[in-house]
Image (tube, rainbow, N blue to C red):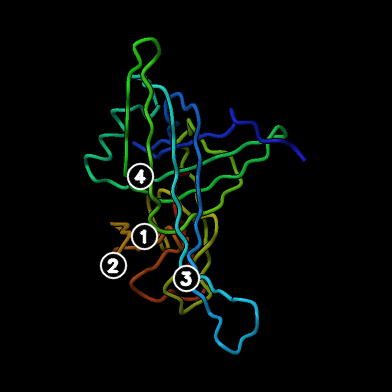
């Protein structure tokens, strides 16, 4: 058993093809909530009973105001997402003294940003994010400076299927899908594929084609880690 020290808890935002830490965070937190509904009734006994209704989550960050930091999300970068009404892909990572990692990842909207200056101190800011959709639990370190190496996933068709899935394709940047040596001209992430398109669903780690595959058809997917 190893401790997780506060200095090894980090908040990342995916921006411009990179996972970027937030600038000089003093503290950060994440809260998961479970809404419930009472299911007890008159003859159900002395104890109340409940069932889950919905799950939600929020995150907070407090940090120092610093500007023009390379590959780092500073105050102006965060406000640009808020003013642009853009969702952010967010990671909250903890690393213990033995190198074990536990990360929560999800989409969020930035609801509140406050910055202030102290005449006798340094400028600070705080930010609140509200999760939209589920949290994914990850147990590998976040690649802050990925080498952008293109990787290849291979699949051999059983015959008759129009799609396939594999955990290796979860949350990737899919560059190309090639079927029997013929590349799909366009990789889409929503809708129904037609013609030479291929549909990539990052949530289900699946590739869908507009036609059934013949037995023993060779398919490969070129992708990069996010």
Q: Quadrant of residue 100?
A: top right
Name the mark nearer the viewer: 3 or 1: 3
Name the residue tied to disc 3: 53
Name the residue tied to disc 2: 191
Q: Position of residue 51 (x, y in %)?
A: 54, 74
Name the residue tied to disc 1: 182
Name the residue located 34 percent from the left edge and 11 percent from the top edge: 119
Task: Pick whichever of labels 1 and 4 is earlier in the sequence.
Answer: 4
Task: Pick whichever of labels 4 and 2 is earlier in the sequence.
Answer: 4
Q: Secondary structure at mark 1?
A: strand
Name the residue located 38 percent from the left edge and 32 percent from the top edge: 126
Q: Secondary structure at mark 4?
A: strand
Compared to residue 148, the image places residue 199 above or below, namely: below
Task: Pick whichever of labels 1 and 2 is earlier in the sequence.
Answer: 1
Q: CA distance from mark 1 to mark 4?
A: 35 Å
Q: CA distance from mark 1 to mark 2?
A: 22 Å
Q: How many labels sit on residues?
A: 4
Q: Secondary structure at mark 3?
A: strand
Name the residue tied to disc 4: 88
Which quadrant does the N terminus fall into? top right
For this view, does 193 lie left or right of residue 213?
A: left
Q: Position of residue 92 (x, y in %)?
A: 51, 41
Q: Secondary structure at mark 2?
A: loop
Q: CA distance from mark 2 to mark 3?
A: 29 Å
For this view, does 92 lie left or right of residue 114?
A: right
- Badges 3 and 1: C-beta atoms under 8 Å apart? no
The residue lying toward the viewer, choosing from 55 and 107, is 55
Name the residue located 59 percent from the left edge and 38 percent from the top edge: 94
């Amino acid at each position: 058993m190893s401790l997780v020290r506060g200095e090894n808890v980090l908040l990342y935002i995916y921006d411009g093809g990179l996972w970027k830490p937030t600038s000089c965070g003093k503290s950060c937190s994440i809260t998961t909530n479970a809404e419930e509904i009472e299911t007890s009734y008159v003859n159900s006994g002395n104890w109340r009973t409940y069932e889950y209704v919905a799950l939600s989550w929020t995150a907070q960050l407090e940090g120092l105001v610093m500007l023009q930091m390379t590959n780092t999300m500073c105050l102006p970068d965060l406000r640009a997402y808020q003013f642009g009404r853009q969702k952010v892909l967010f990671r909250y990572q903890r690393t213990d003294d033995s190198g074990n990692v536990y990360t929560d990842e999800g989409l969020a909207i930035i609801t509140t940003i406050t910055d202030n200056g102290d005449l006798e101190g340094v400028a600070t800011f705080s930010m609140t994010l509200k999760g939209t959709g589920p949290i994914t639990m990850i147990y590998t370190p976040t690649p802050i400076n990925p080498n952008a190496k293109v990787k290849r996933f291979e699949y051999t068709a059983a015959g008759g299927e129009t799609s396939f899935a594999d955990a290796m394709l979860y949350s990737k940047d899919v560059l190309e899908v090639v079927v029997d040596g013929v590349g799909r001209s366009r990789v889409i992430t929503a809708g129904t594929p037609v013609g030479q398109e291929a549909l990539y669903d990052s949530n289900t780690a699946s590739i869908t084609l507009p036609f059934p595959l013949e037995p023993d058809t060779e398919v490969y997917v070129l992708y990069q880690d996010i």
